[in-house]
Amino acid sequence: MADFSLKGKVAMVTGATSGIGRRQALALAQAGAAVVLTGRREAQLQQAVTDIEADGGRAAALPADLGDRAELPGLAKRAALPFGPIDILINAAGVNFRQAVEEITLESWDRTLNLNLAVPFFLARELVPGMKEKGWGRILNIASLQSSRAFPNGLAYGASKGGIAQLTRAMAEAWSRHGIICNAIAPGFFPTELTAPVYENPELLEKLAVQTTIGRNGVLPDLDGLTVFLASPASDYIAGQVIHLDGGFTAK
């Protein structure tokens, strides 16, 4: 029987203040993991901790500016203080400026590629030694529909998410032999802060729903099953994959 339990595991979730990251943190806690929530906005992190604890789970807030790569080694060490060494890392923090090609600046390009692509690698690399000691770990990246196709005003974001797909494969090649499994979820359209401009346009939102085979856009609970599966021993033989959680958007 497949083992979907995360009891005894410790997870770290970046971008846990809202949206996909927050929902994934809740799902991991419900499956038994102790969860360290990381992001810039402390009040939102503390509210998520309160929600998890009210549901019987264990969680701790770790406010941090992930965009400062120099802080990542210290952040990785602090993440182990509340519950012990990290077993599961979810890289959900991200940014999308939605700029036309002519509007992209060196600063916005660097911020996008840094937070969306560089930080997931360098943070994971800090946590891998602890996972190696246990001979078990999970790294779950957040890819995108734009990992495999282009959208308007998404050049920098799409480049970063295309990179995440390859980073996921390369992580799997580097670390799977040590029992550290890396995969990625590529969500379709979910109601988050990053997709707020889409959800403010009912006509576009309906068009996107029609593009799916299921006939609707995502709701945050749709993330729960795949997140827990890929974080659990049940996914022991799945590595280096980008799994689209998009209601069949990419099937059409």
Image (cartoon, rainbow, N blue to C red):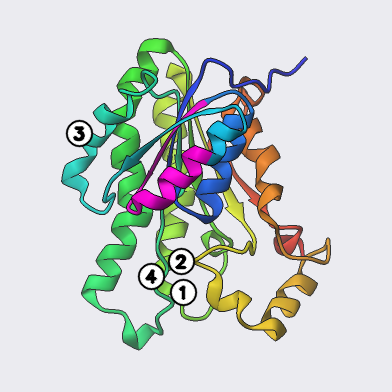
Q: Do the residues bearing badges 1 and 2 touch, measured as CB atoms within 8 Å?
A: yes
- Which residue is located at x 41 percent, y 57 percent? 94
Query: How much space separates mark 3 and mark 2, taking CA atoms?
Result: 29 Å
Horizontal and vertical percent position of residue 59: 46, 31
In depth, the one of 9 and 170 nearer the eye is 9
List the residue tagged with mark 2: 158
In the image, which residues are magenta?
34-50
Kindly state the secondary structure of the residue where label 1 is placed.
Answer: loop
List the residue tagged with mark 4: 156
Q: Is residue 15 visible?
A: no
Horizontal and vertical percent position of residue 68: 21, 51
Q: Do the residues bearing badges 4 and 2 touch, measured as CB atoms within 8 Å?
A: yes
92 displayed left or right of 227: left
List the residue tagged with mark 1: 154
Q: Amino acid at mark 4?
A: Ala
Name the N-terminal-most of marks 3 and 1: 3
List the residue tagged with mark 3: 74
Horizontal and vertical percent position of residue 187: 61, 55
Query: How much space separates mark 4 and mark 1, taking CA atoms?
Result: 6 Å
Q: Do the residues bearing badges 3 and 1 touch, measured as CB atoms within 8 Å?
A: no
Q: Do the residues bearing badges 3 and 2 touch, measured as CB atoms within 8 Å?
A: no
